[in-house]
Amino acid sequence: MGDFSHLDEHGRAYMVNVGDKASSRRRAVARGQVHMASETIQALSQGNTPKGDVLAVARVAGIQAAKKTAELIPLCHPLPLTSASVSFQIEEDHIGIESTVETVGQTGVEMEALTACSVAALTIYDMCKSLDRLMVIGSVALWEKEGGRSGVWKREQ
């Protein structure tokens, strides 16, 4: 696992200095799921939820969250994002969420992709909780990253 990059020699947290790193194209993909009852999925997919178009709102919430990640995660650098998207896959027992975030910069966008995915899931939960309090948010994980010294990384299926 190696050393923690956000701790100094005394174990105190600090923001990593990326000033000497070369800028490069960075991309990250995160995925997650919101498990719910089939009746809730049916209402959501037919647009019959009390709060309106759940996926449209969750998409915007996820994109907005990606842009605000440095305000939410204490040691993240504020990044000028060049792209952020959130998409959904309606399955029999869950809604699959995928977020993709890109920038050209000195540090990666993994946290932005994970934050977008997580906030989209939380938004789905919030908008559907009156129909289904047993929903479960899970499996939020980084699936791909590109750029920087470590190059391309993909999670094995």
Image (cartoon, grey):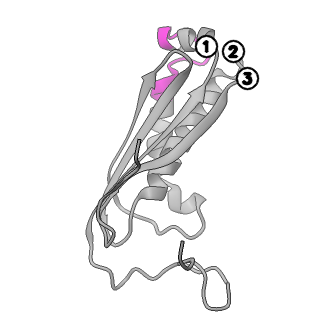
Real-space Cα separation, disc 1 to disc 2, in angstroms: 6 Å
Q: Secondary structure at mark 3?
A: loop
Q: Which residues are magenta?
A: 45-57
Q: Amino acid at mark 1?
A: Thr
Badge 3 crowding class, 10 Å Cα cut-off, few under 14, some 14 to 19, many 20 or more, is: few
Whether residue 6 is visible to the viewer of this picture, yes or no, is yes
In the depicted structure, whether residue 149 falls above or below residue 25: below
Q: CB of mark 1 within 8 Å of CB of mark 2?
A: yes
Question: Against 42, is 105 above or below?
Answer: below
Number of marks in picture: 3
Secondary structure category for the residue under label 1: helix
Q: Which residue is mark 1?
A: 40
Residue at figure coordinates x 56%, y 70% from the top left: 75
Does residue 99 appear to the left or right of 75 in the view shown? left
The residue indicated by pointer 2 is: 131
Task: Name, please, the residue furthest toward the front.
Answer: 156
Residue at horizontal 47 percent and vertical 45 percent from the top: 64
Rounded to the nearest angstrom, the CA distance separating label 3 from label 2 is 9 Å
Q: Nearer the viewer, residue 30 or 64?
A: 30
In magenta stretch: residue 87 = no
**Residue 155's x, y, as percent?**
41, 49
Q: Where does the image place residue 41, in percent across and percent down from the top left?
A: 56, 14
Q: Which residue is denoted by mark 3 in the rendering?
A: 134
